[in-house]
Amino acid sequence: MLKVAIVGVGQTPFTRNCGVSIRELCFEAFREALENINLTPKDIDASIICSAPEYDKQRSPAGLIAEYLGLNPQPTFYAESICSSSSTGVKIGSSFIKAGLHDVVVVIGFQKMSEISSADVQERMGRGADIQWESPFGTMMPAGYAMFARAHMQKYGTTEEQLAKVKVKSGKYSLLNPKAMYQRAVTLEECLKARVIASPLKLFDCCANADGASCIILASEEKARKITDTPVWVAGIGAASDTLSTTGRTNLAGLTCAIEAAEQAYKMAHLEPKDVDVAEVHDCFTIAEIMAYENLGFCKPGEGGKLIEESQTYLGGKIPVNVDGGLLSKGHPIGATGGSQIRTIVLQLQGRAGKIQVEGAEVGLVHNIGGVGLYGNVTILRR
Amino acid sequence: MGFEKFGRIGYISETRVADFVKYLEDGKIMATKCAKCGKVYFPPRADCPDDLSANMKWEELSGKCKLLTYTTAHFAPTGFEEDTPYTLALARYEEGVNVYARLSKDINEDEIHIGMDLRLSPLRLANGKITYELKKA
């Protein structure tokens, strides 16, 4: 079986209003990914451009981005799975390489959420659920995850304090991430006193919209060894889906698509949860991180609250999670998020993570979810 | 046409299960049942994915259900802002299917608990539209 490596990673700072166009945003991430590696745009065989199109003004952005990055006449493709679009792009790019169709593939994820007005963003949020049977009741992302939070609290006794502790950890590490939108520590009290968004989730339980771009460069083993001395290998890659409707769900205290994607990724990598040295999980809401601990096997179902309570997901703990601040502090520019998570893990495995370095990290995992547990993506990387 | 009457804000008008709205106006909550395999669907579907059949029959549901989970939204998508706060809920019918709806404003927040008995009822809205809501059983 052909091996796939990540040979370059890049990311713009995530900000509220980036003040540049989407092509410029993507170029910045692309330029960083090409720094210090032996590769030029003409060596790239194909590009995959990832975003959530409802925020884009440009129709068919793949064409625009490929042109601006100097990637014509190579083929370009567009991938979308909402918040996990760039993980989907990495899966498709890896498949191209494994199939022998292309040797070097660039995956660009971006979102300029400030491209449209706040009212327009709010309008689109309402249409993220089943528009025939659920959106007419006034649904939105926080309400979707809040229903999982309520069910998790009922089933396992998880508390609002435990949810808040996820944000406290995020705030602590945000101070070490110059690319995070919020670089600010928060106290447990601030979290618990914040206004309610969708009970039991309060302001600090929720991530924020952002502008940003990420870039991941994939290569076949043969090419990778010529491009860089520090390739990071895609050891396992899993993807799954669940019902878009809430009514179709059977598990309300975990994300079935994440459990399924994790099983696939662990099996492909011949690894187990205990082998993971560092992880990035999709903490769009605090409850999402607690469910991720359980769904990825870092603890037993129902023990996610206890894992954060005992600080086991801090640096130096049993399994450091989101030590770059996670979505809760970095912000969540939908199409760019998965690529940003992968970048963090690649830097960890290359020993380039600076103050958040997990010493000797060999295996890292990325958990990236689209929608309210709609699309599950788990990627396992090793050095 | 016909489905545009459903919901506070409707996003679609055409569907092969639009008769659901006519039944709702008569006070009935209907599911569809596959004539071939007998599986009951709610929300109603026009096609059964298990055996690819489009031969579906309408079947009235009891209306009796239990609360599975809920959230009170203090922040809403465009068009729903004036309704806040409102409680969104998922309930399980005794027939084994789930329903997503708002909890009636008659239920106080401190009375809400997972597992409580509820009844799904049609609700006529001021703008001439119709929906359903979960009331105390």
Image (tube, coloured by chain):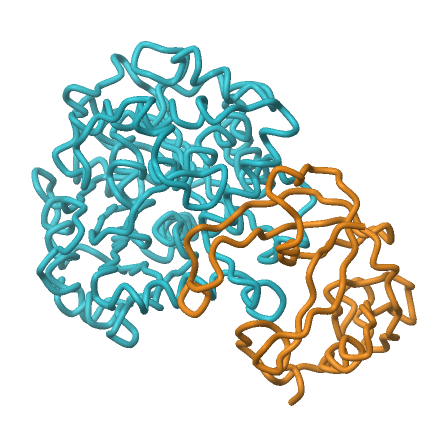
Chain colours: A cyan, B orange
Q: Residue A337 in the image: x percent, y percent? A: 31, 46
Q: Which of the pair A21/A203 is nearer the observer?
A: A203
Determine whether A236 is above or below A54 in the image.
above
How many numbered marks have been drawn onto this rendered protein structure? Answer: 0
- Going 60% across and 71% down the picture, which residue do you hit? A132
Quarter of the image that includes the N terminus of chain B:
bottom right
Instruction: Identify whether B58 is placed above or below A152.
Output: below
The structure residue drawn at horizontal position 41% and vertical position 52%, both measured from the top left corner, is A88
B74 with respect to A256 (left or right): left
Determine which quarter of the picture holds residue A295. Answer: top right
A27 or A257: nearer the viewer: A257
User: Image check: B124 left or right of A141?
Assistant: right
Image quarter of residue A26: bottom left
Residue A304 is at least partly visible in this image: yes
Residue B110: where, in percent of width, then height?
A: 61, 37
The answer to whether residue A105 is visible is no
* Farthest residue, direction bottom: B1
Counting from the top left corner in percent of width and height, residue A359 is at 25, 12
Which residue appears at 16% of the width and 31% of the height? A177
Q: Quick check: A171 above or below B91?
A: above
Write down the quadrant of residue B49 in the picture. bottom right
> Quick one: B134 or B15, which is closer to the camera?
B134
**On screen, B58 above or below A277?**
below
The residue that appears at 10% across and 50% down in the rendered structure is: A31
- Residue A12 % position (x, y): 15, 47
